[in-house]
């Protein structure tokens, strides 16, 4: 009986997530096969690092898939990393594009890759903030990640620029997340 209750709970959480955000898996956005195998150091990441890709923003799944492939190509071919650096990317179409996912170590923030999720807004946000659909997708992804046990419920969120010498994710994004109760400036 306990197994059935757990299954029903999982199905309920999954259906709530599906109503809140759409996860576009690597096979759906056209990813190359990845070479990564390093798991996160801790089972539940303690940090969420917010980044931007510094490229072109996108407003449709076709555009966002193309931009995500471009980011992966850059990370594989130019940076020589084993895959796209981010755990997830978010487009202004309101979709979440899975990069390395919940369980794999990213390459987004030196010193934090093995204990955080790196989430990148697709585009450059130095002059403006992402649209409301992108913010909603971020909040839904974070809530869902906690509910399914893939993110510490007491996680801290920070801007990439708070940790590294970079302009990412842009001042408009940093200013918004600085209002959140779990924001941590390093």
Image (cartoon, grey):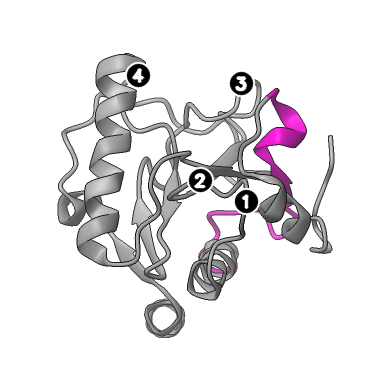
Cβ atoms at labels 3 and 4 below 8 Å apart? no
Q: What whole-number distance in Å separates the C-alpha atoms at marks 3 and 4?
A: 13 Å
Q: Where is 93 relative to 121, above or below?
A: below
- Residue 145 image offset from top left, x and y in percent: 53, 61
**Residue 136 bears which disc, if any?**
none
Mark 1 is surrounded, within 10 Å at the Cα level, by few (under 14), some (14 to 19) or many (20 or more) other residues, namely few
8 displayed left or right of 135 = left
Mark 4 is surrounded, within 10 Å at the Cα level, by few (under 14), some (14 to 19) or many (20 or more) other residues, namely some
Task: Identify which residue is drawn at 17% across, 33% down.
Answer: 33
Residue tagged 4: 81
Cβ atoms at labels 1 and 2 below 8 Å apart? yes
Task: Assign a secondary structure to mark 2.
Answer: loop
Point out the tag, 2 or 3, that comes first from the N-terminus: 3
Task: Identify which residue is drawn at 47% across, 31% down.
Answer: 105
- Residue 177 seen in the figure: yes
Q: What whole-number distance in Å separates the C-alpha atoms at marks 1 and 2?
A: 8 Å
Residue tagged 3: 110
Residue tagged 1: 127
């Amino acid at each position: 009986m306990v197994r059935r209750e757990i299954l029903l709970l999982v199905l309920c959480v999954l259906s709530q997530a599906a109503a809140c955000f759409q996860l576009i898996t690597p096979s759906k956005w056209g990813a190359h096969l990845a070479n990564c195998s390093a798991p996160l150091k801790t089972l539940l990441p303690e940090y969420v690092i917010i980044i931007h890709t510094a490229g072109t923003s996108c407003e449709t799944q076709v555009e966002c898939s193309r931009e995500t492939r471009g980011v992966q190509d850059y990370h594989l071919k130019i940076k020589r990393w084993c895959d796209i650096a981010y755990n997830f990317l978010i487009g202004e179409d309101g979709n979440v594009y899975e990069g390395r996912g919940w369980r794999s170590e990213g390459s987004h923030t030196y010193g934090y890759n093995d204990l955080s999720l790196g989430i990148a807004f697709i585009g450059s946000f130095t002059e403006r903030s992402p649209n409301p659909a992108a913010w909603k997708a971020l909040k839904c992804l974070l809530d869902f990640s906690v509910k399914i046990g893939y993110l510490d419920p007491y996680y801290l969120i920070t801007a990439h620029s708070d940790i590294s010498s970079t302009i990412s994710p842009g001042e408009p994004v940093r200013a918004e997340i600085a209002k959140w109760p779990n924001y941590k400036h390093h």
